[in-house]
Image: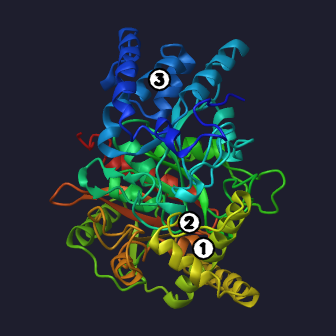
């Protein structure tokens, strides 16, 4: 496998800025990239053409021979050099890895093969590994983490389908909050309004797609971390069913299955395309998801039929809806009725204290274990200079959890999962907002503040999303609205366990009825 010589085990903190396109060196690097992009443009791919293509169209063009993976990579790097200094979405470039991968494919005669042939992608810098490169988890404690000796199964599947990873995107420390801000990498900005958050924890991925660096970016979701950034950045964000996509080989289960991997994208068909490429049982894993009736891309050609849609208006945290969120919910209900679906109000019988208590216990103990492993590798104890304020509180609380507490949290996951299957005896889909509020200003949800201030401000951000993580059900955010100030507003659709096909058919219908592709952030 190709490796990136820019990232080595022995790099010192002084050499770290060379890895990051957030730093001053990005401008000088960008000049060279723009020169290479000019050559690609003369061959037929302009900057506007590149941004107008989704991953589906890119792969089709590569297979047809009208574009090459090298041209697409050059365009992606050029766009990154141009806009990343503004949004700070990409924190590591692995250009050598990508070029070596493309060279190997060309030598083997398979450079134009696969469902994702030649598509440039970015990987989330959190618990995801690319052989020969480092993963920082957004944390100073992992600043000089060793290069990975393997590639995560999900990313390897994307590569096998033809995708070309060329860098990593920012996340908050350990993915612990719904914004993407860290003391290690700084603030990731929303391309729709640079003073606002891109969401979290996959905010770097969402900002990169919304800014046109890539059409699709890898993302993970343990409490809303795909759906919230997708909503804030005007994208499609599907959290798959528990165990639909692989989490190994480092760990076969994330947070008792609450955390799963997938992508954020601009189009429904790209989400289906990548889910087809990534889904399926992972050898060595004890966990399975329901088998598919047919590939997800084929589901897009099927009508969803008349669906029974339940509407949930109230966040489990009790946070009131912003006026733009409430208006988008009403517009979505009207759109669904106009398409022939049935609508009924629903009150969820879920105890929020049990939900958030169990979720917090699992996250905290998993984090405690990860930090202990890193401390053992470093031969020292983590200090306050290694970890942000909220992270330190989470770790302190986790130290009080015993085996009984973990067992009880697992039982809560099971009870909530069973309770959330009952509404689907009557309904096909549950509709709700993704978040109660619009995207917040930068700084409001960062981890470097007092716990009480953070908790109060976080009330509106994950009150709708965490439930599907604990219950394991698939849920998708769709960009169905916009505030008066121009900020995107997503709506959340949840289906029974294993029913991604229902969500994708409905999402495709909504996209065709009121297309959102023309709505783009302008940088």
Residue found 48% across the figure and 35% down from its top: 18
Residue found 43% across the figure and 34% down from its top: 54
Estimate the x, y position of residue 260 in percent, counting from the top left: 61, 60
Estimate the x, y position of residue 321 in percent, counting from the top left: 28, 77
Q: Nearer the viewer, residue 336 or 399?
A: 399
Residue 489 vs 344, above or below: the answer is: above
Give the CA separation, mark 1 to mark 3.
38 Å
Sequence-earlier tag: 2 or 3 = 3
Residue 119 visible in this rendered orientation of the protein: yes
Residue annotated with mark 3: 72
Looking at the rendered image, the disc whose residue lies closer to the viewer, 2 or 1, is 1
Estimate the x, y position of residue 458 in percent, counting from the top left: 38, 76
Give the CA separation, mark 2 to mark 1.
9 Å
Residue 184: numbered disc:
none
Q: Nearer the viewer, residue 509 or 175?
A: 175
Residue annotated with mark 1: 363
Structural crowding at the residue carrying mark 2, measured as other residues with C-alpha within 10 Å and reported as few (<14), some (14–19) or many (≥20): many
Quadrant the N terminus occupies: top right
- Looking at the rendered structure, the secondary structure element under dot 3 is helix
Residue 383 vs residue 330: left or right?
right
Q: Nearer the viewer, residue 361 or 397?
A: 397
Residue 416 vs 198, above or below: the answer is: below
Q: Are the residues flagged by discs 2 and 1 in contact, CB closer than 8 Å?
A: yes
- Looking at the rendered structure, the secondary structure element under dot 2 is loop
């Amino acid at each position: 496998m190709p490796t990136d010589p820019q990232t080595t085990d022995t790099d010192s903190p002084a050499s770290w800025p060379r890895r990051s396109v957030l730093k001053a060196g990005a401008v000088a690097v960008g000049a060279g990239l723009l020169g290479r992009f000019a050559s690609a443009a003369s061959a037929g791919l302009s900057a506007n053409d590149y941004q107008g293509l989704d991953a589906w169209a890119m792969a089709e063009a590569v297979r047809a021979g009208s574009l090459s993976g090298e041209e697409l990579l050059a365009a992606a790097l050029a766009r990154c050099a141009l806009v990343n200094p503004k949004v700070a979405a990409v924190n590591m470039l692995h250009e050598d890895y990508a070029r070596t991968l493309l060279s190997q494919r060309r030598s083997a005669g398979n450079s134009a093969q696969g469902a994702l042939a030649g598509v440039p992608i970015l990987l989330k810098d959190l618990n995801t590994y690319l052989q020969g490169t480092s993963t920082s988890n957004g944390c100073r404690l992992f600043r000089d983490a060793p290069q990975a000796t393997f590639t995560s199964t999900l990313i390897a599947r994307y590569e096998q389908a033809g995708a070309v990873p060329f860098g990593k995107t920012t996340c908050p420390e350990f993915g612990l909050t719904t914004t993407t801000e860290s003391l290690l990498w700084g603030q990731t900005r929303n391309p729709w309004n640079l003073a606002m958050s891109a969401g979290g924890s996959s905010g770097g991925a969402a900002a990169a797609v919304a800014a046109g660096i890539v059409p699709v970016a890898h993302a993970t979701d343990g409490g809303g971390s795909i759906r919230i950034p997708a909503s804030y950045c005007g994208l499609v964000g599907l959290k798959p069913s528990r165990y639909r996509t692989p989490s190994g080989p480092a760990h076969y289960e994330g947070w008792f299955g609450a955390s799963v991997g997938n992508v954020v994208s601009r189009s429904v068909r790209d989400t289906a395309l990548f889910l087809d490429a990534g889904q399926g049982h992972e050898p060595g894993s004890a966990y399975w998801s329901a088998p598919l009736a047919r590939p997800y891309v084929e589901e897009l050609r099927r009508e969803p039929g008349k669906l029974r849609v339940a509407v949930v208006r109230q966040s489990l945290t009790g946070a009131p809806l912003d006026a733009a969120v409430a208006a988008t919910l009403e517009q979505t209900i009207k759109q669904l009725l106009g398409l022939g679906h049935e609508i009924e109000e629903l009150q969820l019988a879920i105890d929020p204290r049990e939900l958030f208590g169990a979720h917090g216990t699992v996250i905290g103990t998993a984090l405690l274990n990860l930090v202990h492993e890193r401390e053992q590798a470093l031969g020292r104890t983590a200090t306050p200079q290694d970890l942000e304020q909220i992270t330190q509180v989470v770790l302190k609380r986790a130290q009080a959890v015993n085996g009984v507490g973990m067992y009880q949290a697992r039982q809560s996951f099971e009870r909530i999962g069973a309770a959330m299957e009952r509404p689907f005896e009557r309904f096909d889909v549950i509709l709700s907002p993704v978040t109660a509020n619009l995207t917040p200003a930068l700084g409001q949800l960062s981890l470097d503040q007092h716990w009480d201030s953070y908790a109060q401000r976080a009330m509106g951000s994950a009150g709708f999303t965490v439930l599907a993580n604990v219950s394991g059900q698939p849920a998708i955010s769709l960009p169905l609205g916009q505030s008066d100030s121009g900020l995107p507003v997503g709506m959340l659709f949840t289906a029974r366990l294993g029913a991604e096909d229902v969500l994708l058919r409905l999402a495709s219908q909504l996209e065709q009825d009121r297309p959102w592709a023309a709505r783009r952030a302008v940088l």
